Image: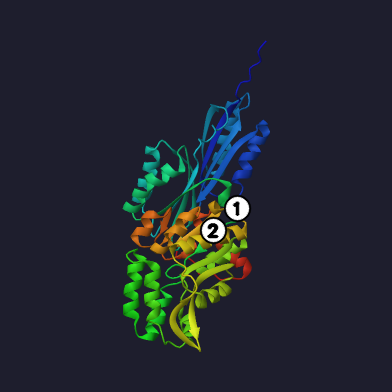
Amino acid sequence: MTQTTSRPETLLITLTGKDRPGVTSSIFATLAHAGVEVVDIEQIVLRGRLILGLLVTAPRDWRRLAEEVHQTGRTLGMSVDVERGVGDNSRRSDGRSHVTMIGSPLSARAVAAIAGRVADLGANIDRIERMARYPVTAIDLHVSGVDTAALRTALAAEAAQHRVDLAVQPATLMRRGMRLIVMDVDSTLIQGEVIEMLAAHAGCEAQVAEITEAAMRGELDFEASLRARVKLLAGLDAAVLDEVYDEIVLSPGARTMVRTLARLGYRFAIVSGGFSQITDRLAADLGIHFARANELEIVDGTITGEIVGAVVDRAGKAAALREFAAESGVPEAAVIAIGDGANDLDMLNAAGLGIAFNAKPVVRDAADTSVNVPYLDTIVYLLGISREEVEAADAEAGFITPAPPL
């Protein structure tokens, strides 16, 4: 004799209306009388409007329960819909990804284009969460049913066309684990280029800036361009380094990003084609664990125009990333690299997630994702951390966060 197990019938109950205390407890009190089991539940509140979805097992007299739920809804001033079905939610399709969209502003046209392309791929958006509303709007889409790499490729063109920043990452435990953040310094962690600031004191800023720009575009060999620029600094008093350090302006959100992720046990490294006399102080100031940069030769208090040791170039940055990952006990797949120039490309490619931050076109095209807003702390949204969580943690630690506009 063969025994068959039938799938239990279920009721999908949806309540919508103005949020108020007691809605959830009231509806569950009604369900409790019927002795049903909770299969699934989701609830969101959007601008004071509540949407509550419940999937419960259906009792024998399910119509009576449906009427009781409707009555509870009327008492609460809520709209209620009850739909009878069979079974639990079907298992979400394989190929699950997080698609994070960042805009300033984020237009409805951009969201429509991204969502449409997801549908074209035969995939499904299972859930949408807001990660931030100020100073940028960031939302996270939970997508299933398509390979992450294929999804990233398909959405890249839409993101570029609609000028929205987009990151597509696999929905794995990696996103929740401790990771290593490796950052470029000039025009990434800080605003501007240190070598150009030094050149301003040496009276050769225009010459250095021209060489720097060509190197960042990938038109010149980095090591040759660096040595050419450093030679122009020969004879400069080394005390100028202190003045330049005092002039440095961090990218907006840099301290917030480091402070927030440090609370979660993240480790940090800065890898720069700039100078250790600056980057070592930055690392100490920000609590960054590792730093790698070029060392200016200084003799008798004067910059000689030479570099001590091997140059930290494009390949050197990637090598430093791997070294720091090994020392931290972090797999390379758990490394996030952030940079803006052509000499960052190997580093971005070596990381599990490479982010082009306000980068040159050649870098944006090659990176996993790009961020083109000026706020470095938007990186936390890509990691599933919301603005509200950041502000709550800061408030608890005594940091004052400016209030967003109404």
What whole-number distance in Å separates the C-alpha atoms at marks 1 and 2? Answer: 18 Å
Asked whether residue 100 is in view, the answer is: yes
Q: Residue furthest top?
A: 1
Q: Is 341 left, or right, of 3 in this rendering?
A: left
Residue 254: x and y, percent? Answer: 50, 68
Q: Do callouts 1 and 2 mark residues in contact (Cβ within 8 Å)?
A: no
Residue 224: x and y, percent? Answer: 38, 70
Q: Is 365 left, or right, of 87 in this rendering?
A: left
Q: Which residue is mark 2?
A: 322
Which tag is nearer the camera, tag 1 or tag 2? 2
Of 148 and 241, nearer the camera is 241
Element type at mark 1: loop
Of 28 and 404, nearer the camera is 404
Asked whether residue 164 is in view, the answer is: no
| Residue located 60% across and 44% down the image | 24
| Residue located 53% across and 54% down the image | 383
How crowded pointer 1 is (Cα within 10 Å; few <14, some 14-19, many 20+) is rated as some
Q: Which amino acid type is marked by label 1?
A: Gly
Element type at mark 2: helix
Counting residues from the start of the chain, the first of labels 1 and 2 encountered is 1
Residue 322: x and y, percent? Answer: 54, 58
Quarter of the image where the C terminus is located: bottom left
Residue 79: x and y, percent? Answer: 50, 40
Quarter of the image where the N terminus is located: top right
Q: Which residue is mark 1?
A: 177
Q: Which amino acid type is marked by label 2?
A: Arg
The answer to whether 23 is drawn above or below residue 2 in the figure is below
Instruction: Identify the image quadrant of residue 199.
Output: bottom left
Instruction: Identify the image quadrant of residue 68.
Output: top right
